[in-house]
Image (spheres, rainbow, N blue to C red):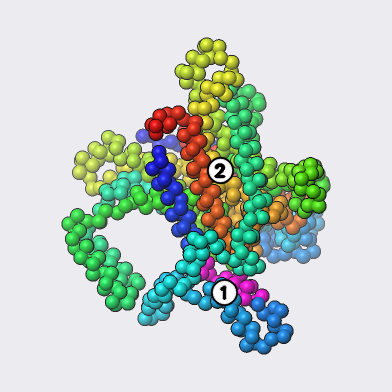
């Protein structure tokens, strides 16, 4: 199992490197207005007082600092007949970028010249609690609802309604779901019970209960959207697996022995039915990052997803690449976590390894 | 293997779904000739973010958006956008996925051998395409040519399986939405490039599915019988194995179409990769941010989007049976 896990991890790392490189090199191909912005900023304060020569010099200095004056890749091809190839050696933007990433220097944002990591850290501090809450809540709800769906006849009104709602939710893209919630729950003309946007009420003391309450109320709508969007994908397969387990001979035997229904579901069937859920969870973690993009843009939360959406809108490639790498890292973590959980939940794996 | 079909006994839902999709497609096809009072892109500056009205000389039946554009015309333009972008993207991805996945499942990593001369041909094409500097080119090409001559007899195994699985792993690492965000950053892409991007993201999943099915199909007695009867390999693959191996796509293609429509609407909603001039359902929904409380911006496009996606899903469920 260790070898298998290692192969997958190497695969993810390789994929992350290839994807980030592709984004980087594609970014070099397209005319970048973030770069233009960065260059234009140099002459804003200076333009009134300095000569054109000085402006050009400061722009040149900025180009050098952002390594824009070097060729994009190890080799470049000069277009036009005759086609010529040029070898640039190690002094190129790609090499510079790669070396930086490997050393933990992820570059600076082209938009406001802040180090990428400094921009990411506060955004992550906002997004990580949101994501882990969404993950925990949706898993818990999926377990409960799955057990409910599986533990009785399918045709009761409650189960039929629940299935209908879940299949409806499955079809709905996250942004439509979030829009609907926004329109229903945070609209002065409908129910105005939750705040629509982050109003920035940070004045209270962070350790006080009021701050915590305000924080949760602010997160309620985004959290609800994320949980509702993730729920069908988790619940429906779990319910099907549980139903399958409950029809198997060991469940019949347990029932014949007089095991209560609740204990049968939670204690006997669930450990066997929960394994496919782990695979879904591996995909769910990265999907939550994508969900954060939508939710944070809509509810104006200062998190990771909004940072990425803004970076995409302004072609801020260093931030975008950091986002791609970070998401790949999340996937890596999810893979490891799912495999460890699998190992913990399935005693047969332990036997083969020992 | 009996082909699953839409059967009357499979319930009315599939017919409702097909009917709805046909309606959307017809509206999208006929969009330029529909008698609409307004065009989808021209703003009516006298009515900005106006609620629906049904009286007056030229009413906005479904209201207007914050730019003063008619929502009804936008809905029609949005269904045309589906026909122009999501549908071709799904069709291309399905074709590409079936072919590559079918080849990967049938031949595996070692089954398909190109003849020796194909390597030399590739080398010559690469030389012509790249036109490397003479010395470097010779330095690389001569050893390669020596190798090619050595392998002339055995031919070249194409690692199809590895390629398909690698592409699938590569694109599965990061969610599609983030990849599209990263690749479509900056000035709006044209419809053509967006199409290429969507196909690129959608085909590996399909290829994987067909590959798995093909590995089972190729061991079935009728395929072995076809091989034993001496039919050419290409014919066995194309005529006998591939149709059976592509069966899962009947259910998966509608699901992919639904996923791509969702992805495309999300992009339009975020306003990335799209120009302001392209009107789509997602974009109309996104404009709610400029006019909070304008329920008519959500009601129309949201209902259409939801109905289309539910129809596609129920179609997928029906053809699964």
Q: Quadrant of the N terminus of chain B?
A: top left
Foreground of the two, A155 or B303: A155
Q: Is residue A303 visible?
A: yes
Estimate the x, y position of residue A210 in percent, counting from the top left: 80, 43
Classify A50 as above or below B104.
below
Question: 10 Å neighbourhood of mark 2: few (<14), some, or many (≥20)?
Answer: many
User: Residue A147's quadrant in the figure?
Assistant: top right
The residue singled out by tag 2 in the image is A284
Chain of the residue under the numbered disc 2 shown in the image: A
Percent position of residue B195, x then y? 51, 58
Which label's residue is closer to the chain start, 1 or 2? 1
Q: What is the span of residues highlighted in magenta in the rendered image?
A: A25-41
Judging depth in this view, the residue of B48 and A266 nearest the camera is A266
How much space separates mark 1 and mark 2, taking CA atoms?
Answer: 39 Å
**Position above or below: B170 against B11:** below
Question: Residue visible at 31% across and 72% down?
Answer: B128
Check residue A37 for magenta coloring. yes
> Percent position (x, y) of residue A289?
59, 49
Q: Which residue is mark 1?
A: A65
Which mark is nearer the camera, 1 or 2?
1
**Dot 2: element:** helix
Q: Look at 32% across and 52% down and name the residue there.
A: B159
Which chain does the residue under circle 1 lie in?
A: A
Q: Is residue A340 above or below residue B32?
A: above
Asked if B304 appears above or below A313 in the picture, the reply is above
Place residue B147 in its image quadrant: bottom left
Q: Residue reaching furthest top?
A: A257
Q: Is residue A182 found left or right of A10 in the rendered image?
A: right
């Amino acid at each position: 199992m260790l070898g298998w896990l290692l192969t997958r991890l190497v695969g993810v790392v390789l994929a992350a490197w290839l994807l980030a490189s592709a984004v980087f090199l594609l970014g070099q191909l397209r005319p970048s207005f973030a770069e233009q912005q960065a260059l234009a900023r140099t002459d804003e304060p200076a333009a009134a007082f300095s000569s054109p020569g000085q402006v050009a010099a400061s722009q040149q200095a900025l180009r050098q600092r952002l390594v824009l004056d070097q060729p994009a890749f190890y080799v470049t091809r000069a277009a036009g007949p005759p086609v010529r190839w040029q070898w640039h050696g190690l002094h190129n933007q790609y090499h510079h970028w790669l070396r930086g990433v490997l050393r933990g220097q992820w570059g600076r944002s082209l938009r406001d010249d802040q180090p990428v990591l400094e921009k990411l850290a506060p955004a992550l501090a906002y997004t990580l609690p949101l994501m882990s809450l969404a993950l925990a809540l949706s898993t818990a709800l999926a377990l409960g609802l799955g057990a409910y769906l599986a533990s009785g006849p399918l045709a009761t009104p409650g189960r039929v309604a629940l299935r209908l709602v879940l299949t409806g939710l499955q079809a709905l893209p996250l942004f439509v779901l979030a829009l609907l919630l926004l329109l229903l729950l945070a609209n002065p003309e409908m129910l105005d019970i939750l705040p629509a946007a982050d109003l920035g009420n940070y004045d209270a003391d962070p350790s006080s209960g009021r701050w915590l309450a305000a924080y949760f109320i602010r997160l309620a709508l985004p959290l609800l959207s994320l949980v509702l969007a993730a729920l069908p994908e988790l619940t429906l397969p779990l319910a099907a697996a549980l139903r399958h387990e409950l029809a198997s001979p060991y469940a019949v035997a347990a029932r014949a022995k007089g095991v209560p229904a609740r204990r049968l579901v939670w204690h006997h069937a669930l450990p066997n039915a929960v394994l496919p859920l782990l695979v879904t969870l591996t995909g769910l973690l990265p999907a939550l990052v994508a969900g954060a993009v939508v939710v944070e843009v809509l509810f104006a939360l200062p998190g990771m997803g909004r940072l990425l959406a803004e970076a995409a809108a302004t072609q801020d490639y260093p931030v975008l690449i950091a986002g791609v790498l970070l998401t790949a890292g999340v996937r890596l973590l999810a893979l490891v976590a799912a495999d460890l959980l699998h190992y913990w939940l399935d005693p047969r794996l332990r036997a083969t390894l020992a | 293997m009996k082909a699953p079909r839409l059967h009357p006994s499979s319930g009315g839902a599939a017919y409702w779904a097909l009917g709805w999709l046909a309606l959307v497609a017809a509206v999208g096809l006929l969009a330029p000739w529909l008698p609409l009072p307004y065009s989808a892109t021209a703003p009516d500056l006298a009515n900005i973010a106006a609620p629906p009205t049904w009286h007056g000389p030229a009413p906005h039946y479904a209201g207007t958006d914050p730019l003063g554009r008619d929502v009804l015309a936008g809905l029609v333009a949005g269904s045309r956008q589906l026909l122009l972008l999501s549908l071709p993207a799904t069709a291309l991805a399905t074709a590409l996925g079936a072919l590559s996945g079918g080849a990967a499942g049938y031949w595996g990593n070692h089954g398909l051998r190109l003849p020796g001369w194909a390597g030399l041909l590739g080398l010559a094409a690469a030389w012509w395409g790249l036109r490397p500097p003479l010395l470097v080119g010779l330095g690389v090409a001569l050893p390669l040519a020596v190798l090619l001559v050595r392998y002339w007899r055995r031919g070249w195994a194409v690692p199809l399986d590895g390629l398909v699985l690698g592409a699938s792993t590569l694109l599965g690492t990061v969610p599609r939405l983030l990849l599209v965000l990263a690749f479509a950053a900056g000035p709006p892409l044209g419809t053509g490039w967006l199409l290429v991007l969507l196909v690129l993201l959608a085909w590996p999943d399909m290829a994987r599915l067909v590959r798995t099915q093909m590995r089972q199909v190729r061991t079935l007695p009728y395929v072995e019988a076809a091989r034993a009867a001496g039919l050419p390999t290409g014919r066995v693959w194309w005529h006998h194995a591939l149709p059976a191996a592509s069966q899962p796509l009947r259910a998966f293609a509608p699901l992919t179409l639904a996923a791509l429509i969702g992805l495309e609407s999300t992009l339009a909603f975020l306003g990335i990769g799209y120009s302001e001039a392209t009107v789509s359902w997602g974009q109309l929904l996104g404009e709610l941010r400029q006019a909070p409380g304008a329920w008519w911006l959500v009601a129309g496009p949201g209902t259409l989007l939801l109905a289309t996606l539910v129809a596609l899903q129920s179609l997928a469920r029906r053809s699964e049976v």
